[in-house]
Amino acid sequence: MHAEPHLDRATILGQLRTFVAGWFRDGREEGLGEDTPLVTSGIVDSTGVVEVVEFVERRFGVRLTDADISLRNCNTLCGWAVFVSSRLR
């Protein structure tokens, strides 16, 4: 899939929320805010981060390096959305 520079942060955030809720929370989006800790709370473990990376690469057409995988980028939906938005510019 090709990068989609026209996607805004809210759209990216919504798609990430839907993915994380579906993959890690049996579809439950309640309580999954943009600043909810994903990794440090245990919602997403290290293997789960790989699943999110694969989703981001497929859905948004961005490539992540090992250096991109950090708590700053990966611990919240907001962090993911900001990171993806920066790569789509």
Image: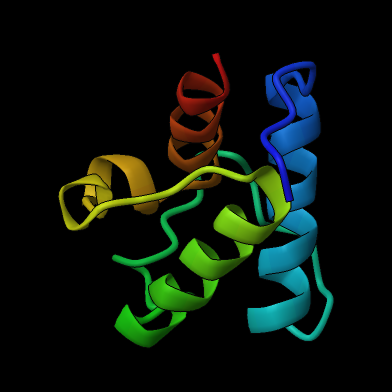
Image side of residue 37 versus residue 27, left or right: left
Q: Position of residue 53 (x, y in %)?
A: 47, 63
Q: Nearer the viewer, residue 50 or 58?
A: 58
The quarter of the rendered structure image containing the C terminus is top right
| Total numbered labels placed on residues in the image | 0
Q: Residue at x 26, y 40 (%)?
A: 72
Q: Nearer the viewer, residue 45 or 35?
A: 45
Q: Residue at x 36, y 50 (%)?
A: 64
Q: Position of residue 28 (x, y in %)?
A: 81, 72
Residue 82 sits above or below residue 49 on the image: above
Where on the picture, by quarter, is residue 30?
Answer: bottom right
Residue 9 sits above or below residue 69 on the image: above
Q: Nearer the viewer, residue 2 or 64?
A: 2
Image side of residue 66 versus residue 16, left or right: left
Q: Residue at x 44, y 62 (%)?
A: 38
Q: Position of residue 41 (x, y in %)?
A: 37, 69
Residue 52 sits above or below residue 23 on the image: above
Given the current orientation, which residue lies at the most extreme front position?
2
Q: Position of residue 1 (x, y in %)?
A: 73, 51
State the scheme by which the image is colored.
Answer: rainbow
